[in-house]
Image (tube, helix red, strand yellow):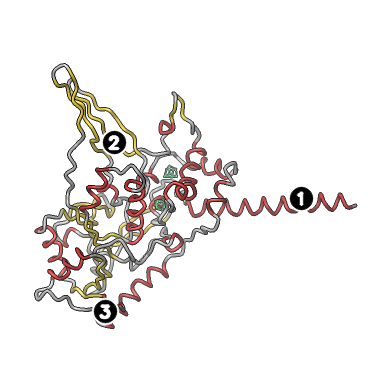
Amino acid sequence: MTEEQTTYWLPRATLERLIRMLVEDGYEVVGPTIDQSAIVYGPIESVADLPVGWTDRQAPGEYRLEPRDDDRIFGFVVGPHSWKKYLFPADELVASAARAGDTWQFTTPDVVPRNYAFLGVRACELAAIAVQDRVFLGGPYVDPLYRARRDAVLLIAVNCTQAAATCFCTSMNTGPRCTRGFDLALTELDEGFTVECGSDRGRDILRRLTADKVPAMADRDQLRAAESARAQAVAQITRRMDTDDLRQLLLGNLESPRWDSIAERCLSCTNCTMVCPTCFCSTVTEVEELTQVDRRRQWDSCFNIDFSRVNGNPSRNSIAGRYRQWLTHKLATWHDQFGTSGCVGCGRCITWCPPGIDLTEEVAELRTSARLRDSADHVSKAEDSAGAIQ
Ligand code: SF4
Ligand code: SF4
C-alpha cells in the first residue's frame, strides 16, 4: 500500500476531541507539559495542558525553554523525563511481610495496571521502550509489574519536525521518523496532523474520532508538507556517533588514559542514568515498621559507589571505573545481554550532564587515540624490522 492509501488527516481541532475521547474510554492521558521551566511528562486533560507555542534549546549541559513564533503543539524535542517513569516507576512496592499472629504473611502487590495513553512519544522513545521490553520481558524472568503496565499502554507517537543540537538518533537508526511500535503516529502541520495507524486499537480510535466513522485520507499537499517537515528534523541532526566496531573499540581500550580524563570532569552525580530512557538499574530497600516490612524497588545508578558493593567493598571505587562501566555497558556489553544497543541517541545524558560530558565526543576521542596508538605501534614495528635488516 502506498503512503497515500495509509495516511489520514486530522484537523488541528480534533486533538482536543482525541484527548476527551481517551479520557472517556478510561485512559489516563499523559504527555508533555511545562513544569519548572522544562517540558516534562504529566497528566493531560486538554490541549491547553500541552506546551503550545514553546520550544526547547539544548546543548551539552544546557536546556532552555523559548517561545516559538507559531502555535505548534509539539514544536520541541525531548526533556528530562522519559516514559520509563510510568512503565518502570522510580519507587514501587514489590513485596510485603506483615505480622499475622505468631508468624509472618508474605504478599506481593496486586497488579492493577493504570490504563495510560502516552501522547507525544518520539521515535527514539519508541526505540527506548522496545529496549526496556527486552530487559523486563525478554528471557525466562518476566517482570509482572512491567508486563501489566506495558500491555495496557496506548502509544500515540509524534514524528519530530525539528531536532536539538544533542540529538543523534540517525546514528543509532532509531529516528527521527516513527516506523514501528505505535498505535497512532502524527506529523504536525499548521492546520492539523497527518496520521498513520500502527495497530487495530489505533485504527478504531481514529475511526471513532470522525463523525461518519470514515477518517479522511491526507491529500498530496498534506503528505508533501509532512514529508518536508520530517526532512527538516533529519537535516538539523549534526551530532554523529560512528558505531562501526564500537564494541571492539570500547572493550579493546579498557585501560585507555581517556577514562581518567573524563573522571576529572565527571561529578558521578547520576544525572545521565536518571534521564536515560533505557537505564534500568535498581536497588531494593526494606522499609520496616513494627508489624510490617515493605520491600521497595527504587531506581539506582552505576555511578553510585554503593551500587557495586560486594562483600563490604565497592568493586568500582573510582569515577573513571564507573564512567567506563556505564559507557561500555550502554554501547558494547548491552549487545551481549540484550542483542541491541543500550543507547537510542536521544541526547538527554548530554543535555542534563552538569559539566556537559558528551558520549559521542568521548567515543570519537577513544577512536582517535586508538588509531594514533595503532599507527605509532605500526611505525615502531616497521623501525624494528628495518633495524633488523641492517
Ligand atoms: S545513553 Fe544518553 S543518548 Fe543514549 S539513550 Fe541514554 S540518555 Fe539517550
Ligand atoms: S557523566 Fe555527567 S551526568 Fe553522568 S555522572 Fe558524570 S557528571 Fe553526572
- Classify mark 1: residues with Cα within 10 Å, few (<14), some (14-19) or many (20+): few
Q: Is the distance from the Cβ of mark 3 to the nearest ligand 1 atom less than 8 Å? A: no
Residue 205, percent across and down?
16, 66
Residue wearing tag 2:
297
In the rendered structure, which disc, 2 or 1, sits on the residue that comes first in sequence? Answer: 2
Q: On the image, which quarter does residue 198 sit in?
A: bottom left
Q: In front here: 34 or 194?
A: 194
Q: Helix, strand or loop at disc 2?
A: strand
Residue at the far top in the pictured view: 102
How many labels sit on residues? Answer: 3
Residue 208, percent across and down?
12, 69
Q: Which residue is drawn at 59% across and 47% down?
A: 252
- Classify mark 3: residues with Cα within 10 Å, few (<14), some (14-19) or many (20+): few
Cα separation, mark 2 vs mark 1, equals 54 Å
Residue wearing tag 1:
380
Amino acid type, callout 3: Gln
Q: Helix, strand or loop at disc 3?
A: helix
Q: On the image, which quarter does residue 235 sit in?
A: bottom left
Residue 77, percent across and down?
33, 60
Q: On the image, which quarter does residue 69 sit in?
A: bottom left
Position of 43 compared to 246: left or right? left
